Image (tube, helix red, strand yellow):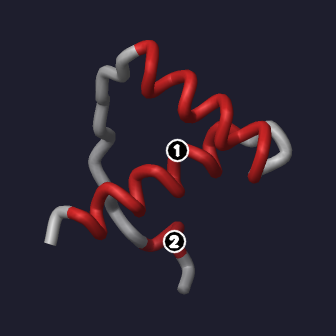
Amino acid sequence: MDYADIEMEAVTIELTDEELEQIDHLAFTQHRDNSDAAIRDLLDEWLKNQK
């Protein structure tokens, strides 16, 4: 799928210090310090739990 063709709006969220620590930990341990990948994983997990 070519994601360049998808039009999406920007979303801004506020995170607590605890959530930022969780992102840093996940990025370090599972994503070679890639915070963006860690955020995607956590967002995906959250979305799946919203069903």
| Residue 25 on image: x %, y % | 67, 34
Image point 78% across, 44% down: which residue?
A: 29
Asked which quadrant contains residue 16, the reply is top left
Image point 25% across, 64% down: which residue?
A: 49
Q: Are marks 2 and 1 in contact (CB under 8 Å)?
A: no
Res. 48 mark: none
Image point 39% across, 61% down: which residue?
A: 45
Q: Residues within 10 Å of mark 2 (few under 14, many from 20)?
A: few
Looking at this view, name the residue that lies furthest to the top: 17
Q: Is residue 42 above or below residue 20?
A: below
Measured in 3D between alpha carbons, the distance from the residue under mark 2 to the one under mark 1, in whole angstroms, is 18 Å
Q: Which residue is mark 1?
A: 39
Looking at this view, name the residue that lies furthest to the left: 51
Q: Between tags 2 and 1, which lies in front? A: 1
| Residue 7 on image: x %, y % | 33, 62
Q: Is residue 36 above or below residue 24?
A: below
| Residue 1 on image: x %, y % | 54, 86
Looking at this view, name the residue that lies furthest to the right: 32
Residue type at numbered disc 2: Tyr
| Callout 1 secondary element | helix
| Callout 2 secondary element | helix
Q: Is residue 13 above or below residue 45?
A: above
Using residue 40 as the reference point, say whether residue 44 is left or right of it: left
Asked which quadrant contains residue 24, the reply is top right
State which tag comes first along the sequence, 2 or 1: 2
Q: Quadrant of the C terminus?
A: bottom left
Give the total of numbered labels.
2
Residue type at numbered disc 1: Ile
Image point 44% across, 20% down: which residue?
A: 18
Q: Which residue is mark 2?
A: 3
